[in-house]
Image (cartoon, rainbow, N blue to C red):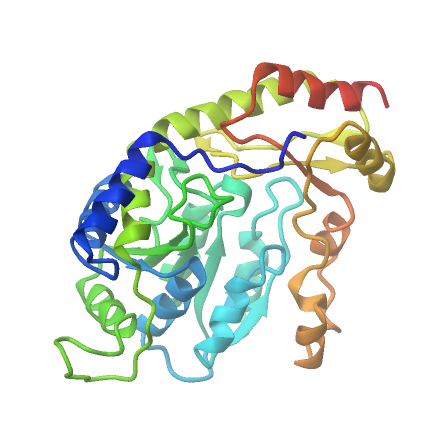
Amino acid sequence: MIPIASPVITKLEKELVNEVLESGNLATGEYVTKFEQNFANYIGVPYAIATSSGTTGLHAAIESLSLPEGSEIITTPFTFIASSNSILYSKHQPIFVDIDPETFNMNPDYIRDLVRNNRNIKAILVVHLYGLPANMKAIMDIAKEFNLKVIEDCAQAHGAEINGRKVGTFGDVGVFSFYPTKNMTTSEGGMIVTHNEEINAKSRLLINHGSPERYVHTIIGYNYRMTNISAAIGIGQLKQIEHFTSKRISNANMLNKGLGDIKWLRTPYAPEGFKHVYHQYTIKIEGKGRTEVIKELEKAKIGYGVHYPTPIHLQPVYKELGYGTQELPHSEKLANEVLSLPVHPGLSELDIKKIVSVFTSL
């Protein structure tokens, strides 16, 4: 079986975890601090705050902006539900905007149209989907013009860049996830990154019960801390992230070459100057039934994913909240066309040839 995703865990991570186990300090501590420092240096920001997951990181990041309660925050319906849920956790309102059908990311033109007519919009939560950066120049221009905060959801985009600048550094605050399927892992975990000292300070309070020192609590906070065990894995993974990324890109290039001439599908697109890091290698199936393709992949014992089969505004819980009537045609159409194929660093060249052969035989 060729899995859709597979974390690469090496001897280094195992040795670091054993160090933590032998130290007896299993909760937060020096390994978390070191991981934060190393990750901040990798991204190119002064501050990084480790969290228990990408979702808890998003929640804390949004709250750290101190927006007026009930603020509206623009985001995409075409991603995992954690992004918009984090807005709701913070007692704000997600406002969904449709996507660009080529990049699968939010279309800045639609953002501008929304903001121009709605002064209750206070922020934009941008998702860099599948590892491809969103159009941050256009989005930041809109944010500057209308005085909006920008949160970058970088859960799928470790090391993704626009003209050499890493995602997570464009907006007010960025958040990464280290779930096992991601480009690097800590088992479960996340990281908030920012240039802003106030956001850093408030985020640190929020993830630690609102406590600046032991048994002193200045705000209502949460237990969103990362453990030393997770951080130890992260320290080891971060040392290898460039290798992981180059392998993903190499695998994607081989898939592009093998699938590029098939007329009924579209391989992933990246604008010039945008570094796609391929958390997912997601194709569009336009001239054939997706179910037919999936059946052939299953016969060949090749893993796959549909990311995502139902846009967030059409999820049952969001329909109950009144979102189901909104029409977002690109998101709704792509939900029926997208198909993710294995691209992870554990693939061999033979694996990739096997994946390609399924498509060339259809």
x, y (%) of residue 40? Answer: 23, 47
In the picture provided, is 199 more to the left or to the right than 116? Answer: left
Residue 262 shows in this picture: no
For the point 57% across and 25% down, which residue is it?
A: 252
The total of numbered circles placed on residues is: 0
Q: Is residue 179 left or right of residue 242?
A: right
**Along the line of sight, the residue nearer the viewer: 164 or 338:** 338
Instruction: Tell me: residue 349, above or below residue 320.
Output: above
Q: Please tell me which residue is depicted at 49% across the width and 47% down the height of the picture.
A: 128
* Figure quadrant of residue 96: bottom right
Residue located 28% across and 50% down the image: 231
Residue 120 x/y as whole percent: 47, 79
Q: Quadrant of residue 90?
A: bottom left
Name the residue: 29% across, 70% down: 207
Look at the picture and state if 295 lies above or below 361. below
* Above or below 289: residue 85: below
